[in-house]
Image (cartoon, rainbow, N blue to C red):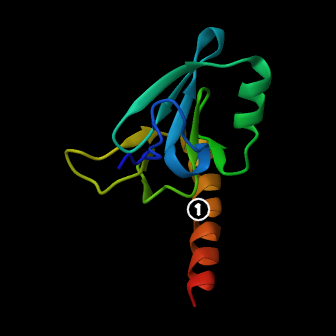
């Protein structure tokens, strides 16, 4: 009996809002996507970059980095943490100017999520 497995390759096909914690936009359309246990670099067109940077799920943390507001666990001391703090934690930096606004958005998301659970 032959059974075909429907396995998605995270490295080639990922869902931006579900799989990516943050991404960085580099020179010449090179974008570095950071997931839980990996990072992927892809070259995107100007239109594709404009589309992902305008996604409401992502917040511009600094000049080239966009964080997924639904994947944040903690914001502290100019850093956005995506896993528990410690040696293996994933984080990126955020400017002090934008940190306050991101905290407001993050708190709103958390309160909406807790309302949906109840």
User: Vertically, is 49 above or below 108?
Assistant: above
* Quarter containing the C terminus: bottom right
Residue 113: image quadrant is bottom right
36 relative to 67 in the view: left or right:
left
x and y, in percent, of residue 7 in the image: 44, 44
97 relative to 79 in the view: left or right:
right
Q: Classify mark 1: helix, strand or loop.
A: helix
51 relative to 70 in the view: left or right:
right
x and y, in percent, of residue 65 in the image: 57, 32
* Mark 1 Cα-neighbour bin, 10 Å: few <14, some 14–19, many ≥20: many
- Residue at 62% across, 82% down: 116
Instruction: Please give the residue where the numbered disc 1 appears in the rendered image.
Output: 106
x and y, in percent, of residue 81 in the image: 40, 50
Q: Residue furthest right?
A: 47
Q: Residue furthest bottom?
A: 118
- Residue at 48% across, 56% down: 72
- Residue at 55% across, 52% down: 18
User: Vertically, is 46 above or below 90?
Assistant: above
């Amino acid at each position: 009996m032959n059974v075909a497995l429907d396995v998605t390759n995270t490295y080639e096909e990922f869902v931006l809002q579900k799989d990516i914690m943050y991404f960085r936009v580099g020179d010449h359309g090179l974008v570095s996507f950071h997931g839980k246990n990996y990072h992927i670099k892809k070259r995107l067109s100007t239109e594709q970059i404009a589309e992902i940077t305008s996604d409401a799920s992502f917040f511009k943390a600094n000049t080239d980095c966009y964080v997924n507001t639904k994947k944040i666990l903690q914001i502290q001391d100019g850093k956005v943490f995506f896993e528990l703090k410690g040696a293996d934690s994933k984080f990126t930096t955020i400017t002090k100017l934008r940190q306050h606004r991101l905290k407001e958005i993050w708190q709103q998301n958390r309160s909406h999520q807790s309302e949906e659970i109840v």
